[in-house]
Amino acid sequence: METGELVTCTYKTGRYIGKLIDPTPAKPTSVVQILAVLRHPVQGDLHQPGQTDVALFQERKALAFNEKANIPDTHLKPYSGDVPDYNESLIRAVELFEEGLVNEHSPFADASLQALRSLQRDYRLKP
C-alpha cells in the first residue's frame, strides 16, 4: 500500500477508515490518520473480555478525527468508497454498539452501557 491510500483498520477492538500516512516496509506497522469510525471499541478489560470482576473496567474511547495511530500491517485493508463524516460515523458506531448491549441483558453489557454513556457525554453526543 502507498502513502495517501485509504484503508480500513482495526485498533484494539475498534474499526476505522483512515489514510495511510507512513507505510514503512521495514517495519510491521504503518501510521494511519483516522477519518471515520466503523465500529466503536469494546469496553472493559481487553485481557478478560466479557468480565466485570476485573481490577479496572476501562472506558475505551474511539480514536479521534485526524489522530495518527501505529497500526499493524496485518490489520490494514484497502478501502474504496466514500468516507463518511467523522462525527456522523462516531454517532452511528456508538448507536450500533449501544443497541447490541441493550439487547444482551448481562452484567458485562450493563457495565459497558454505563461506560458508553459516560463516553457519550465526553463525545458530546448526549447531554
Image (cartoon, grey):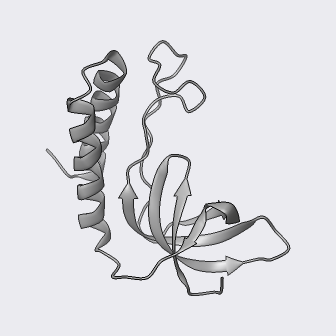
> Outermost residue, top direction?
53
Q: Nearer the viewer, residue 119 or 47?
A: 47
For this view, does 71 lie left or right of residue 114?
Answer: right
Q: Quadrant of residue 27?
A: bottom right
Compared to 125, does 8 lie above or below? below
* Residue plotted at (30% across, 59% down): 90
Residue 69 figure quarter: bottom right
- Where is residue 9 drawn, in percent x and y? 53, 63
89 versus 56 height, above or below: below
Where in the figure is residue 68, as x and y percent of width and height? Answer: 56, 68
Name the spot of residue 50 as percent of width and height, x first. Answer: 45, 24
Q: Nearer the viewer, residue 124 or 84?
A: 84
Q: In this rendering, is residue 116 above or below 26?
A: above
Q: Residue 11 location, x and y as percent?
A: 55, 54
Name the residue located 33 percent from the left edge and 32 percent from the top edge.
115
Q: Residue furthest right?
A: 26
Q: Is residue 99 left or right of residue 61?
A: left
Looking at the figure, which quarter contains the N terminus? bottom right
